[in-house]
């Protein structure tokens, strides 16, 4: 019995060591750069080759089985498996960093986009921002009049979204990729098996790093599906920071030839401006909303109403947990990073090779078929 107890202690300490090693390595720049340039592309190819071909979310199934086995072991064997349990947790943490956690240390997307003009004039900057918000509103209104369709079963509609976002990912330069993964065949976004829980947790989608799967909440309005799918698929490509995944998702949707995916991108672009506009110029925001096409206002209000209905304790706890997780990965602003997209959008507008500037200048229209 004494020997068994010592073995459990050694296992537990080994688990703690594995977890700590993963966290420490994430702070070593040379390791992070090797991960970005060599290990992550190899791992992405491996995971996508396995999970990308599956028609369902294998990560969620695997996670449920692991949880059930762990609970059964704890109930039946209790202290005799505590060391093994700690070892398994430590190994899971290490694998998290090896598969995904290092990506939080990758160079920022901002450094690969055009710099913003120097100098700061509050009045000029506000006028520029209001102008861009108005242009994004007109773009969304034009896109809403196109061949937009949210019809079909969930699998049918998601298949169209995946085809549209895949084309969109190929529509922007490889030079802004977080990692050299342009030649990897990425799997589709999938409907989560626990969508009912995601809605109540105020989670529109998530990336499962151990299998490389992008998953979305099937209960949310379909107008959200394109930009949430593109956001989670941006995570697949190594964009770990939430604001970067959001902007890449919008760029991807706006680069898509599919009118529905494109329309979803215009909604995301407008929402990115609208959040900031509510702070800097509420009166201009009121006028812009009054000029929006009816379909756009209806869709945006339906999205807001969906999340409002699902507010509650579960959502508040989920937000707190996510905030703690993001800060632990070095994202100082935590969940606020989801909304920190404005500067990246402004940089993307100025970046040659990206479609945002041309669209907002009216040089290109929405896809027609």
Image (cartoon, rainbow, N blue to C red):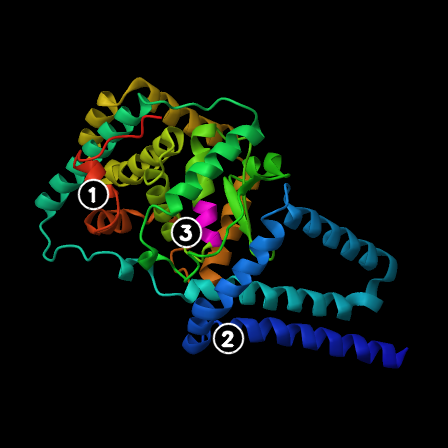
Above or below, comparing residue 197 to residue 51 in the picture:
above
Q: Which residue is mark 2?
A: 25
Assess whether residue 104 is covered by the magenta stretch: no
Distance CA(mark 1)–CA(mark 3): 22 Å
Q: Position of residue 297 (x, y in %)?
A: 33, 23
Q: Secondary structure at mark 3?
A: helix
Q: Residue at x 63, y 41 (%)?
A: 55
Residue 357: assigned label: 1
Taking the image as drawn, is residue 249 in sight? no
Q: Nearer the viewer, mark 1 or mark 3?
A: 1
202 or 42: which is nearer to us? Answer: 42
Answer left or right for 210 relative to 290. Answer: right
Residue 265: assigned label: none
Q: Residue at x 13, y 55 (%)?
A: 117
Q: Position of residue 300 (x, y in %)?
A: 37, 27
Q: Residues within 10 Å of mark 2 (few under 14, many from 20)?
A: some
Q: Earlier in the sequence, mark 2 or mark 3?
A: 2
């Amino acid at each position: 019995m004494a020997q068994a107890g010592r073995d459990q202690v050694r296992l537990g300490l080994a688990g703690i060591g594995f977890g700590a090693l993963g966290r420490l390595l994430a702070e070593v720049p040379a390791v992070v750069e090797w991960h970005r340039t060599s290990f992550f592309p190899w791992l992405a190819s491996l995971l996508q080759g396995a999970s990308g071909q599956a028609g369902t979310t294998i990560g969620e199934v695997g996670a449920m089985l692991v949880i059930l086995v762990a609970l059964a072991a704890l109930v039946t064997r209790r202290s005799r498996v505590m060391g093994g349990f700690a070892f398994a947790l430590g190994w899971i943490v290490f694998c998290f960093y090896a598969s995904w956690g290092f990506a939080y240390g990758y160079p920022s997307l901002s450094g690969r986009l055009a710099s913003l003009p120097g100098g700061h004039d509050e009045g000029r900057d506000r006028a520029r921002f209001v102008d861009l918000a108005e242009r994004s509103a007109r773009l969304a209104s034009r896109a809403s009049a196109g061949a937009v369709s949210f019809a079909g079963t969930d699998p049918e509609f998601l298949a169209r979204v995946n085809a549209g976002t895949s084309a969109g990912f190929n529509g922007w330069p490889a030079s802004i990729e977080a990692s050299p993964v342009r030649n990897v065949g990425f799997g589709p976004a999938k409907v989560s098996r626990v969508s009912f829980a995601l809605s109540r947790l105020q989670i529109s989608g998530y990336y499962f790093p151990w299998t490389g799967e992008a998953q979305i909440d099937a209960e949310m309005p379909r107008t959200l599906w394109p930009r949430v799918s593109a956001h989670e698929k941006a995570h697949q490509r190594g964009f770990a920071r939430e604001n970067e995944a959001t902007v890449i998702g919008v760029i991807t949707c706006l680069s898509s030839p599919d009118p529905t995916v494109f329309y979803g991108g215009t909604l995301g672009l407008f929402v990115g401006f609208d959040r900031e506009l509510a702070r800097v110029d509420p009166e201009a925001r009121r006028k812009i909303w009054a000029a929006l096409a009816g379909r756009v206002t209806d869709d945006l209000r339906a999205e807001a109403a969906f999340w409002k209905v699902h507010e509650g304790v579960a959502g508040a706890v989920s937000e707190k947990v996510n905030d703690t997780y993001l800060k632990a990965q070095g994202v100082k602003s935590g969940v606020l990073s989801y909304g920190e997209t404005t500067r990246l959008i402004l940089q993307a507008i100025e970046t040659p090779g990206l479609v945002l500037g041309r669209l907002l200048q009216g040089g290109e229209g929405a896809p027609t078929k």
